[in-house]
Structure formats: structure tokens, C-alpha cells
Amino acid sequence: MDNPHATTSRRSFLAGVSAAALIPGQAWAQGAQTFEDFAARARAMSGFDPVPRSLLTGARRVLDDTQATAFAAGHSAADEVTRTVLKALYTGRHMPRDGEMQRFAYAEALMYAAIEDSVNVPSYCGGLPAYWADKPGTA
Amino acid sequence: MRHLPLIATAVLTLAAAPQAGGQGADVLLNCSACHTVGPARDSAAPSPYPNLNGQSARYLERQLRAYREGLRQHPQMQATARALGAGAGAMARMYADAPAPDLTYTASPGALPKAEALVTDGDWSRGLPPCASCHALDPADRARLSPRLHGHPAPYLARQLRAYADGSRQSGTLGRMQAYAAQLTEAEITELADYYAAWGPEAASPQEETETDG
């Protein structure tokens, strides 16, 4: 307490923390978001409950911790991250502009879940073996 | 005062009524009473109910919805699905995230020839693709969307095939299973049920015939 620099330092620290708490957008960065928070947000945004775990873990893996926290908290600054997550959930892959494509699910991708009542998942056999080699009946 | 016991009984009955209702809901929502979560408690006594551990999450949720909407028939499961309501997703996630059972084929190869042919080759003369093309040959293969059939009780499996065939179960995507089951003979249904029930823990005895469902 005799050291004026130490007092100033503590005061500065407290002032800094107080100021940081007032900055919009910092609250979500400080919140301890878990994988379950991320998964809950992913379910809410995708409109599917449940979402297969392979999709959730894959989508989480392509984000860093700050992005995942922002997404889980639903912060508006995370719009781009939200688009990345939804693309990953619906396609089962992550395809960055400047990196290699990562695939973490195929048949479980939500794009197939959205149309499963009317379209077969590709690669599932839709008829006799080699049925695709014949001309369509109307050709 | 002579009416006191009568009044007391009436009061106790009225007071207990809400508790009885609550208990009913608890029983309905106690899924693990029939469908054990995680490894079976006693592998020497196989469960008569289907094992939901490690099953596809979306399949489980769709089945609960089908029970709710009457596309699958089973009094207990329909009541449970209705009681679960919006909690169906969470219940499906819980079972899907539980470790799938470790299963091996316990019957002798060739013991169920009709079923083995349908599982691996299908019968294209009747438009029947191999069961394995959707349900996988090996229960550890999780690349497909269709549910794992391996290790379920034979009576349950046979009942589901008959229900698909007679139209009382309509939860199959694109009507595939309804069309498939309608082509099967009763002997084929029995053998297919025995084939998938023969997948169990190593050296397990065959599933006993029971009249339960799930």
C-alpha cells in the first residue's frame, strides 16, 4: 500500500475491468460457454432437434473458442459464424475459401433430413443394380 | 364426529389425487425402466425391449413423433410419446449418445438361409434390395441413416415387419419398409427376426420369446 505505483495499478485494473464490462459485446466473450451451449444454439438455429452429434462436433471443430462462444451466446457480431455453422450442419462439411475441405458427416447432413420424405439419400440404391444404366422409360 | 373417518378418507383421497397423477407421468417418462440406458444390467437375462443405445438420434425422434401422431401403434409408447411432448428431442439425444452395444453374430452361419440371403443379396425378382444396403451388415457400421436392427428381440422385430406389412406401422420413410415387408412371407419374417436377434454379446443365449413391445 506504500507503493503509489501499486495502488495506481490496482485502481487502473479495477477501472479497466469496469470499463470492459460496459463495452457492448464483451459480456458474451467472458461467458463460459460449453459444448452443450453451442449444441443448443445449433439446434435452435437449424430448426432440428436432435442434431446428430457428428455434425455438432464437426461444426464446433471448425470454429475457434471465441467464435464458438459468440455463436453460443447468439451475439449479433457472430452472424458470419452462424452462417458457417449452418452450412456445416446442412452439408456435413466445412469448405473454407483458403483451406482444405473437411467432411465430418454425409448421410446425416441436415440437407437430406430436410427432404427425406421425398428424395432418397444419394448413394442409397434406388432400384435394381445397374438400373441407372438403362434409358428412362420415357426416353 | 361419527363422520370424521369418512371425511378424513375423502380429504386424503382428494389430497392424494394430484400425486397419483404425478406418479403416472413419472412412470410414463421413466424410459429407462424398459429401455436401459448404457450397458445392460444383467446380460444373462436379455431385455424383451429394443436396445436404443447408440441408435440414430433422428430415427429415435421420428419414432416418438410417429407414436404421437398414430403412425406407430403401441399403447404404452403412444402415451409416453405424448407425455414427452417437446422433450422427445432430448430423450432421443440421450439414447443416441449412449454407447452402442458390442454385438457379434451368435448363430451358426447357414442356420437361417432365407434371412441370410435377404440380408446380403435381397431378392430382386420381388424388388427386394438387401436389408444390409440400408441397415448395414455390421452393427458397428454407423454410416447409414436407417436404424440398427442387430440385437433387438425377435418378437419385437417380427411384430414390426408384420405391422409394416399390414399398414399399422406407417413410419417408414418414403414407404420403403411398408413396400418391403408386404413382399415377405411369414417364414421370411420369422427368420429375419431370428437373424437380427442372433446378434448379441459374445456367447449369449438366443433371445427368449416374449410378448412385449416398445
Image (cartoon, coloured by chain):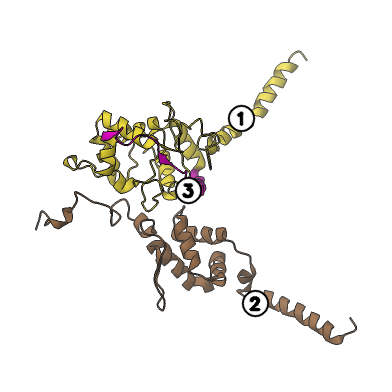
Q: CA distance from mark 2 to mark 3?
A: 41 Å
Q: Position of residue B71 (x, y in %)?
A: 36, 39
Quarter of the figure with the N terminus of chain A? bottom right
In the rendered structure, are the residues bearing label 1 and label 3 in contact, judged by CB atoms less than 8 Å apart?
A: no
Q: Which residue is mark 2?
A: A23
Q: Position of residue B184 (x, y in %)?
A: 24, 34
Q: Secondary structure under badge 3?
A: helix
Q: Is residue A38 left or right of residue B66?
A: right
Which chain does the numbered disc 2 sit on?
A
Q: Residue furthest top?
A: B2
Image mark count: 3
Tell me, by letter, which chain the rendering colours yellow: B
Q: Which residue is mark 1?
A: B20
Does any portion of residue A114 appear in the rendered image? no
Front one among B46 and B183? B46
Q: Amino acid at mark 2?
A: Ile
Q: Which residue is mark 3?
A: B96
Q: Colour of chain A?
A: brown
Q: Residue at x 43, y 40 (%)?
A: B68
Does any portion of residue B107 appear in the rendered image? yes
Q: Residue at x 39, y 45 (%)?
A: B139
Circle 1 Cα neighbour tier, 10 Å, few/some/many (<14 / 14–19 / ≥20):
few
Q: Which residues are magenta?
A: B85-113
